[in-house]
């Protein structure tokens, strides 16, 4: 029997052929690569070992002892909360708030810069506050979903997603703090750096969202 790993989400399949479609992320068989037992990441649950056969020398008339009950892994506390959040798509739902606001924030800063308009600058700042407030929820639910649904697989797709998430968060927080320190930044000679920072934030969020959409709609 061969071992196949989904190169997109890290799902492990055992069999002579890769599955027609990845049951986790939906990519076709061509995205599976054959790996060795030693390459299997530790976090991937292995199939249950087959029960040892009934001892052949069991005496007649004597019933075999009842099999030991399988240990039931009960999810408790935080793990249960994580599962509930993942089941109800907390990540793809919550991500709409910052992703909807980010282009607005960028356009408002850009307008404030071009037209030297203080009102646009204030509006951008208020929208950015909502972005920064929503990011912890988006990041937490994203991590839960990655752990529960994809076993925390460190494949390329998740490396890009994590990098993009870190970039988005960092640039959003820097932008917010920068404005608090210097509310006139958008009308200063450094405004172009500030605009660039916001462009990075927008682009990184766009990349994370694009890949996320592909995972959700399984059209990789
Ligand atoms: Zn997959």
Image (tube, rainbow, N blue to C red):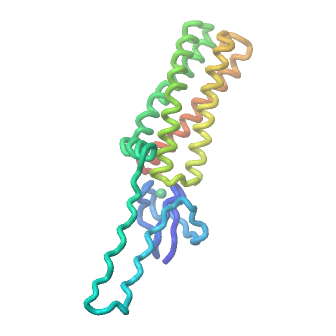
Q: Residue at x 54, y 20 (%)?
A: 129
Q: Is residue 26 above or below residue 59?
A: above
Q: Is residue 182 left or right of residue 213?
A: right
Q: Residue at x 42, y 61 (%)?
A: 21
Q: Residue at x 46, y 50 (%)?
A: 148
- Measuring from the top left, give residue 64's x and y in whole percent: 31, 82
From the viewer's side, name the closer residue of 184 and 192: 184
- Measuring from the top left, give residue 120's x and y in whole percent: 55, 11
The residue lying furthest to the left in this view is 61
From the viewer's side, name the closer residue of 84 and 93: 84
- Measuring from the top left, give residue 207's x and y in whole percent: 55, 39
From the viewer's side, name the closer residue of 127 and 46: 46
Q: Which quadrant holds residue 74?
A: bottom left
From the viewer's side, name the closer residue of 60 and 178: 60
Q: Which quadrant holds residue 68?
A: bottom left
Q: Is residue 78 left or right of residue 155?
A: left
Q: Is residue 106 above or below residue 95?
A: above
Q: Is residue 116 above or below residue 19?
A: above
Count the labels in the image: 0
The residue lying furthest to the right in this view is 189
Q: Residue at x 41, y 35 (%)?
A: 93
Q: Is residue 141 left or right of residue 118?
A: left
């Amino acid at each position: 029997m061969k071992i196949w790993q989904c190169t997109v989400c890290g799902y492990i399949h055992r069999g002579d052929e890769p599955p027609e479609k990845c049951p986790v992320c939906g990519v076709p068989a061509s995205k599976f690569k054959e790996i060795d037992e030693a390459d299997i990441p530790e976090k991937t649950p292995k199939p249950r070992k087959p029960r040892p056969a009934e001892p052949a020398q069991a005496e007649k008339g004597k019933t075999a002892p009842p099999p030991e009950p399988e240990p039931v892994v009960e999810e408790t506390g935080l793990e249960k909360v994580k599962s509930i959040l993942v089941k109800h798509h907390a990540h793809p739902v919550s991500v709409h708030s910052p992703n909807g606001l980010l282009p607005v924030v960028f356009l408002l800063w850009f307008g404030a810069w071009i037209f030297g308009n203080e009102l646009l600058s204030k509006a951008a700042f208020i929208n950015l506050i909502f972005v920064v407030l929503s990011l912890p929820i988006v990041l937490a639910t994203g991590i839960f979903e990655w752990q529960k649904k994809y076993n925390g697989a460190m494949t390329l797709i998740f490396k890009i997603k994590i990098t993009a998430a870190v970039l988005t968060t960092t640039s959003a927080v820097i932008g917010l703090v920068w404005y608090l320190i210097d509310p006139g930044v958008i009308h200063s000679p450094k405004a172009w750096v500030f605009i660039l920072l916001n462009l990075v934030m927008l682009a990184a969020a766009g990349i994370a969202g694009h890949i996320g959409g592909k995972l959700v709609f399984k059209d990789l």
